[in-house]
Image (cartoon, helix red, strand yellow):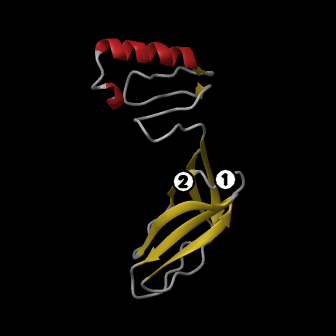
C-alpha cells in the first residue's frame, strides 16, 4: 500500500503487528499487503489515515432511489432527500449513476439529521431534469 512506502522496515513491522492485534477477518481472507484489500474487515477502533484529519469511526455504504426536481439554466440548486441514519457530522461521497450533458453534482452534505443535500449544477442554457428514479450510491464517513 502506498501509505507504507516511506516507512522504515521496523516501522512497517510495528504497524503490521499493531494492525494484526486490532483487525480481524470475518468469514474470508483479508489481504493488507497489496494495493487492494479483499474480504470483510472488522475494526474495533477508529481508523486514521495521515495526520491531523481525525479518526473515522464508521464507514457506511448505502444508496437510495432518487427523483430530483428540474434545474433551471445556468444555476446550481441544492435539493434534499430523506435518508435514515445520516448525521450532520458525516462526510459524504456520492455517485450519480448516469451522466447528463450540462448537469453536474456540486457539493454533497448532510444538512440535518437523516437529510442528504445534493447540489445539482446546470451549466447549460436549458432546463435539465435529472434522470428520475435512479439509484444513487453513497459512502458516509463518520
The answer to whether mark 2 and mark 1 are in CB contact below 8 A is yes
Q: Which residue is at 46% across, 12% downward?
A: 17
Residue 123, numbered label: none
Q: Quadrant of the C terminus?
A: top right
- How many numbered marks does the figure carry? 2
- Mark closest to the chain's N terminus, 2 or 1: 1
Q: Which residue is mark 1?
A: 86
Question: Secondary structure under badge 1?
Answer: loop
User: How many residues crowd mark 2 within 10 Å: few (<14), some (14–19), many (20+)?
Assistant: many
- The residue that appears at 56% across and 60% down in the rendered structure is 109
* Quarter of the N terminus within the rendering: top left
Q: Is residue 69 above or below residue 110?
A: below
* Residue 97 image point, x, y percent: 51, 60
Q: Does 107 appear above or below 39?
A: below
Q: Is residue 19 left or right of residue 102?
A: right
Tell which of 78 and 35 is nearer to you.
78
Q: Which quadrant of the structure image shows residue 24?
A: top right
The residue that label 2 is drawn on is 92
Amino acid at each position: 500500500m502506498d501509505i507504507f512506502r516511506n516507512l522504515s522496515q521496523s516501522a512497517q513491522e510495528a504497524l503490521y503487528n499493531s494492525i494484526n492485534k486490532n483487525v480481524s477477518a470475518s468469514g474470508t481472507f483479508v489481504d493488507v499487503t497489496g494495493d487492494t484489500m479483499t474480504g470483510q474487515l472488522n475494526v474495533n477502533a477508529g481508523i486514521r489515515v495521515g495526520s491531523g484529519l481525525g479518526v473515522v469511526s464508521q464507514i457506511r455504504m448505502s444508496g437510495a432511489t432518487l427523483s430530483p426536481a428540474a434545474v433551471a439554466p445556468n444555476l446550481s440548486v441544492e435539493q434534499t432527500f430523506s435518508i435514515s441514519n445520516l448525521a450532520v457530522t458525516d462526510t459524504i461521497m456520492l455517485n450519480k449513476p448516469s451522466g447528463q450533458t450540462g448537469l453536474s453534482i456540486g457539493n454533497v452534505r448532510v444538512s440535518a439529521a437523516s437529510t442528504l443535500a445534493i447540489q445539482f449544477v446546470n451549466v447549460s442554457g436549458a432546463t435539465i431534469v435529472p434522470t428520475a428514479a435512479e439509484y444513487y450510491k453513497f459512502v458516509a464517513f463518520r
